[in-house]
């Protein structure tokens, strides 16, 4: 049995304070305009637009365009649950629908009591309440790992309702309309369960195959580590979608006979992933092409079961001759050991658990950013000052200072383009019904664009928010555009300032804890390989996979902060490499 060298010792006493060069690197907007590919984005965008149109258009046709806005706010529920398996999607969207309706209801009730449009104290109360909702939404979305626009949409729904001028009798109807919009979104998200019940799983496996292909194509050693991390996350996400644990060498025949194409392809991906640690970067040429072809087949909408490419499952393009026979493991229903391993993936998610302390600082940044932006906007007397708070929240809806800087660039460029688009729409002086139709189209473009790049989404969310305000107010279009532009500048500045001034020391602590957890998981893996394990091999394997993903994500998050971890990057890289070597040995039982 080969003996693994221990990684070099850490240097806990070494402080890595931020220098000017570190700050320049952290604040670099590099990558802000990169486009991404997401399977199923077109259908998802169509569903979101339809969820907004169905409850809003009947109201608009009867001349009630103001109330239609509240139905549209509830319909934002459709933006959540992208590509989740249908049982989990039903639960997530149900909770989100309640949260979205509650945001609209609480905001409307607060506006009816405080009258923020007419009273100074009422405006202050709404500013503070908006900041509190922003912080809570950021914390909740971080704890539940809801991606996308997440907390920003919850905040937007609350802020629009809280800055209106409803009478007390209007609160219940507005809340009911939001509930109708949310329920419509939930209903439209479920029919695929009857037509293509395994489509979310197919898309998850297709994503894993593409990430693995990118790893096998990567020729740069330094970039290979980041690419391997993305492939690991993608494959664990695929297992999470399938409700299975990653494979082991035991009981391979059962899963191969009963697992189906998606299971076989995910198992193959796992084998290629852990074996890639021994391969030279960029050495493979045929296998990545086959993986891309297979991903394309999975992404196509077909009623029949997906088919695997025979040449992909053949041993010729794979380094190990018996890859499938040696990689398949037990299904999640095969026994208590497999169930326990699967629960680690399903319960913790592919990135492992995130402590509550690590979620507090981003939520605090969100709270302070929205409070400062909203407060300054109120002091300056800006109309629709809550736009500044929402802009600050959008900038701070990020992982660290680096991604906040990227969001600031995306928000700036997107807002300028979006305002020009809004001016073009409003120049024609469309009637309210046409505005509602334009908002529905913008919602489609928003949901499609956010999958490609956040900056592209801002191009469409800017006129969307502006036109929704046009439907609920009598403010001239020129004033709306002016307010939006100033509020965006204020919100971006406040967001960047809070990201820089609120030091995220817990990011470094998270790295140290992840390093300790990964080291402990590696020791358990070595113990299991020595036939002295107190935990079954499937559980040890999953624990190590989750730990190495968490280590990389924790280090990446901390690297984007001005104050970084004290552990030498070479130590972290060696620990990560050691984990993948152990995963390869656990897979093949050697």
Image (cartoon, helix red, strand yellow):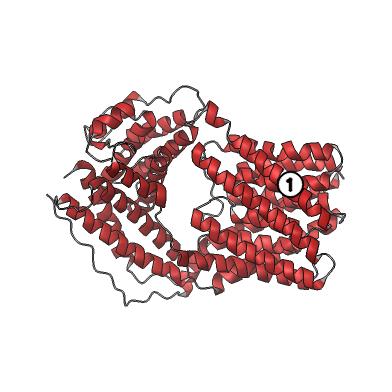
Would you say residue 502 is visible in this rendering? Answer: yes
Residue 129 position, x and y percent, is 68, 66
Name above or below for residue 2 compared with residue 328: below
Answer with left or right where residue 346 lies relative to residue 123. left
Residue at (40% x, 24% y) in the render: 307
Q: Which residue is mark 1?
A: 176
Residue 173 position, x and y percent, is 78, 48
Which residue sits furthest left? Answer: 1
Closer to us: 535 or 302: 535
The quadrant where residue 202 appears:
top left
Residue at (22% x, 58% y) in the render: 523
Answer with left or right where residue 101 lies relative to residue 2. right
Residue at (85% x, 47% y) in the render: 427
Which residue sits furthest top? Answer: 304
Residue 541 position, x and y percent, is 27, 48
Closer to us: 474 or 170: 170
The quadrant where residue 195 appears:
top right
Answer with left or right where residue 85 lies relative to residue 454. left
Name above or below for residue 329 compared with residue 121: above
């Amino acid at each position: 049995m080969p003996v693994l060298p221990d990684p070099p010792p850490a240097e806990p006493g070494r402080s890595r304070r931020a220098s000017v060069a570190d700050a320049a690197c952290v604040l670099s907007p590099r990558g802000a305009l990169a486009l991404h590919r997401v399977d199923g984005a077109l259908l998802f965008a169509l569903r979101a637009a339809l969820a907004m149109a169905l409850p809003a258009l009947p109201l608009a046709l009867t001349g009630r365009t103001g109330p239609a806005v509240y139905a549209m706010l509830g319909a934002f529920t459709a933006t959540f649950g992208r590509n989740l398996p249908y049982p989990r999607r039903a639960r997530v969207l149900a909770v989100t629908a309640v949260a979205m309706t509650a945001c609209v209801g609480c905001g409307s009730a607060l506006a009816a009591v405080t009258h923020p449009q007419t009273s100074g104290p009422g405006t202050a109360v709404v500013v503070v309440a908006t900041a509190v909702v922003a912080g809570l939404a950021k914390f909740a979305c971080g704890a539940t790992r809801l991606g996308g626009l997440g907390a920003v949409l919850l905040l937007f729904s609350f802020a629009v309702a809280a800055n209106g001028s409803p009478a007390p009798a209007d609160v219940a109807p507005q809340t009911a309309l939001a509930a109708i919009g949310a329920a419509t979104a939930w209903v439209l998200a479920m029919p695929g369960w009857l037509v293509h019940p395994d489509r979310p799983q197919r898309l998850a496996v297709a994503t894993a195959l593409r990430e693995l292909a990118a790893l096998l194509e990567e020729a740069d050693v330094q970039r290979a580590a980041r690419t391997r991390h993305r492939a690991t996350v993608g494959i664990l996400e695929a297992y999470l979608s399938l409700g299975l644990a990653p494979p082991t060498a035991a009981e391979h025949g059962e899963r191969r006979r009963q697992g189906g194409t998606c299971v076989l392809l995910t198992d193959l991906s796992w084998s290629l992933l852990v074996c890639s640690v021994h391969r030279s970067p960029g050495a493979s040429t045929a296998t990545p092409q086959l993986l891309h072809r297979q991903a394309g087949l999975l992404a196509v909408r077909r009623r029949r079961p997906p088919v695997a490419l025979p040449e992909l499952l053949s041993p010729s393009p794979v380094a190990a001759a018996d890859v499938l026979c040696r990689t398949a493991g037990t299904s999640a229903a095969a026994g208590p050991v497999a169930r326990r391993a699967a629960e680690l993936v399903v319960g913790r998610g592919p990135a492992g658990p995130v402590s509550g302390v690590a979620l507090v600082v981003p939520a605090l940044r969100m709270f302070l950013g929205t409070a400062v932006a909203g407060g300054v906007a109120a002091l300056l007397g800006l109309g629709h000052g809550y736009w500044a708070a929402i802009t600050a929240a959008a900038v701070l809806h990020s992982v660290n200072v680096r991604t906040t800087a990227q969001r600031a660039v995306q928000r700036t460029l997107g807002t300028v383009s979006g305002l020009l688009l809004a001016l073009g729409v409003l120049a024609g002086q469309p009637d309210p019904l046409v505005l509602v139709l334009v908002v529905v189209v913008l919602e489609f473009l928003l949901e499609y664009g956010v999958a490609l790049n956040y900056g592209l989404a801002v191009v469409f969310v800017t006129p969307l928010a502006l036109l929704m305000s046009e439907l609920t107010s009598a403010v001239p279009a020129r004033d709306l555009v002016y307010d939006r532009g100033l509020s965006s500048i204020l919100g971006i500045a406040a967001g960047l300032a809070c990201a820089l001034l609120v030091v995220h020391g817990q990011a470094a602590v998270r790295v140290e804890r992840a390093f300790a957890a990964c080291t402990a998981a590696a020791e358990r893996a070595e113990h299991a390989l020595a036939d002295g394990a107190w935990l079954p091999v499937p559980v040890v394997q999953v624990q190590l996979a989750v730990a190495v993903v968490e280590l990389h994500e924790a280090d990446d998050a901390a690297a984007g902060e001005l104050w970084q971890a004290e552990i030498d990057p070479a130590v972290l890289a060696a620990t990560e490499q050691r984990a993948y070597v152990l995963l390869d040995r656990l897979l093949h039982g050697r």
